[in-house]
Amino acid sequence: MKCTRCLLQLQSLRLGVQPVRPAVQYAALLQSASPSLTSVPHNPQLQVLRRFHGSPVCAKTPPVKAIKEEEKKKERSLVTQDGLFEQIPEDAKSEATFKKVVDVFLKRDIRRRGHVEFIYAALKKMPEFGVERDLAIYNKLLDVFPKEVFVPRNFIQRMFNHYPRQQECGVQVLEQMETYGIIPNMETKVRLVQVFGEKSHPMRKFQRMMYWFPKFKNLNPYPVPHQLPEDPVDLARFSLTRIANDKDARITIYQMPCTDITESGEEVTLPHIVGIQGPDQMELLAKHNPSRPVFVEGPFPLWLRKKCVHYYILRADPIPAEEKVEEPYDPERCFDYPLQLDLDLDRDFGDEEDFDVEDLDEGPVFAMCMTGQGDQSTLNQWISGLQQTNPILGQVPTFFRLEPGLKELQGARDSDSKNHQRQDHDTQREEGEDEKEREVTAEEEPRSRRQGMKQ
């Protein structure tokens, strides 16, 4: 220890007085920081010799380049990746432009930094470009991932979910394919194996989709097309055939949408009226008692994909039990599935003849229709058109049970708000009159008191 101190003294003498100042500063800091050093006698030579060796990285401030890189990393988010898609105008959004945006991102950086954020942004913007049901686009998005980087190398990496953020992004791509009912192909499998390996979460998701999707692909016997007709008449025709579920039902277009000019020169838009009626419904309406009324009810909503249409029905109340007549079944009507079976079976005393089953009879439905306007005048045209094929409607009273539509609801809300405003205005007037009466009475009381005092 003495030798080292001597060497330090010699080095300080050779250097001169310049290194004394920082050493004195370090010694003063030591004395202020640690209370144990205050008991040591004041020795300037020891203060000069004692120094602190700090690393140059901690002593220096971070460079400006590092700060800029950190700011760039913070700015890398979903919003910045959305900018590539938002630069394209609305008229030019198509499958070709979407592929060009993906190619621009692939050529921007070899390392493909920010590829996860870009894929999430692309999945979000796919419906705007109309490519949400294109399998080639999903395969192209899976091609954005770097190859053979996220593949686990041993069982430990497989067990601990190797690169979880990238695997979650791959699963999200497959889940969006599942949402739109798209079955992946062999190209999808090859890309998943190249990116994540054979034993990974996206690969398991792929295997489950390939097991269940072919089984449920054609399960619905009445599928709804992805592209619904834009013409209101064609849409009404498709909707009514779907509701009726009768191949023998006949669709009649009573009025096409058009604009008519009246004698006064005003333009009047006439809505479309499309109706449907089957032969069984015509038989029921012909047997209907003319003394009992029929009702026009609606509108009832029907959802087709993301569109909501409304329809109206012509129905009657349930037939009372006294007027019901059971007609005998025709045995030759259906040979495969007979409608009635007469079997002589021995019954036991424990067999129950009565069943607790609620039989709800809502009454017969004679016809259905769809119109552009749900007012009573439009539906009267539909009833008058039905009279040509159902003459009994001229003898049966018809009542309308129409629920308020959107426009009527808005008008009702406006009228309610006006009524509330009127009520508030009336209450304010009443309160003002009450206050004036109170002021008048308050003024009259002291006058009467003064008069009493004078008397």
Image (cartoon, helix red, strand yellow):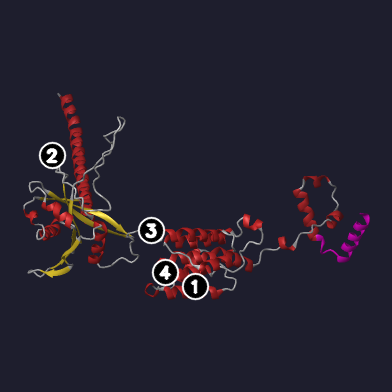
| Labels 4, 2: front one | 2
Position of the N terminus, as image quadrant, is bottom right
Looking at the picture, tell me which residue is in the foreground, 133 or 92: 133
Q: Is residue 438 magenta?
A: no
Residue 192 in the figure: left or right of residue 62: left
Q: Secondary structure at mark 3?
A: loop
Q: Secondary structure at mark 2?
A: loop
Position of the C terminus, as image quadrant, is top left
Which percent across, then down, holds residue 381? 12, 60
Q: Which residue is mark 3?
A: 219
Q: Amino acid at mark 4?
A: Val
Give the mark, 4 or 2, whose residue is nearer the N terminus: 4
Q: Is residue 76 visible to the viewer in this orientation of the structure?
A: no
Numbered circle sitting on residue 322: 2
Residue located 10% across and 46% down the image: 292
- The crowd level at tag 1 (other Cα within 10 Å; few <14, some 14-19, many 20+) is many
Q: Secondary structure at mark 1?
A: helix
Residue 191 against residue 158 in the figure, above or below: below
Residue 98 in the figure: left or right of residue 317: right
- The crowd level at tag 4 (other Cα within 10 Å; few <14, some 14-19, many 20+) is some
What is the magenta range? 1-20
Q: Amino acid at mark 3?
A: Leu
Q: Characterize the magenta stretch by its predominant secondary structure.
A: helix
Q: Which residue is mark 4?
A: 131
| Labels 4, 3: front one | 3
Which quadrant of the figure has residue 45? bottom right
Looking at the picture, tell me which residue is in the foreground, 168 or 41: 168
Residue located 21% across and 44% down the image: 361
Q: Which residue is mark 1?
A: 102
